[in-house]
Image (cartoon, rainbow, N blue to C red):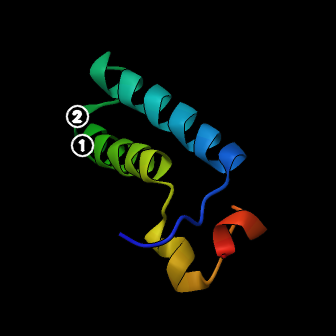
Amino acid sequence: MGKENIGKADRAVRAVVGAVLGALVLLGSIAAPMSYLALVFALIVLYTAASGNCRLYSLLKLNTCGKKCAE
């Protein structure tokens, strides 16, 4: 894994979005073809929230973690 590049607020938003999207998929609110993509997206978002590292942020040289994580 890499360094943390996701701040607390960003992680919280990702966790909520991932949990809600995952719940919608599991409850059957999203139709079958799109539900697979939604589930994969939810898992990726939850993983980045848990790990604190987003590879897309690394590629784009973004950091919402602030100075404490940049060190």
Q: Which mark is residue 15?
A: none
| Viewer-side residue, 6 vs 22 | 6
Q: Quadrant of residue 43?
A: top left
Can residue 67 be seen in this snapshot?
yes
Q: Quadrant of residue 61?
A: bottom right
Q: Determine crowd level at label 2: few under 14, some 14-19, many 20+ residues with C-alpha closer than 10 A.
A: few
Query: Taking 55 as reference, is 32 left or right?
Result: left
Quadrant where the C terminus is found in the figure: bottom right
Marks 2 and 1: CB-CB under 8 Å?
Answer: yes
Q: Quadrant of residue 66?
A: bottom right
Q: Amino acid at mark 1?
A: Tyr
Count of numbered circles on the image: 2
Farthest residue to the right: give it: 67
Residue position marked by numbered label 1 in the rendering: 36
Examine the rendered structure and indicate whether residue 37 appears above or below residue 39.
Answer: below
Quadrant where the N terminus is found in the figure: bottom left
Examine the rendered structure and indicate whether residue 21 appears above or below residue 54.
Answer: above
| Viewer-side residue, 33 vs 1 | 1
Q: Determine crowd level at label 1: few under 14, some 14-19, many 20+ residues with C-alpha closer than 10 A.
A: few
Can residue 66 be seen in this snapshot?
no
Residue beneath the point at 48% across and 65% down: 54
| Viewer-side residue, 9 vs 30 | 9
Question: At which x and y percent is residue 46?
Answer: 42, 43
Examine the rendered structure and indicate whether residue 49 appears above or below residue 3.
Answer: above
Residue beneath the point at 29% across and 37% down: 35
Q: Which mark is residue 32?
A: 2
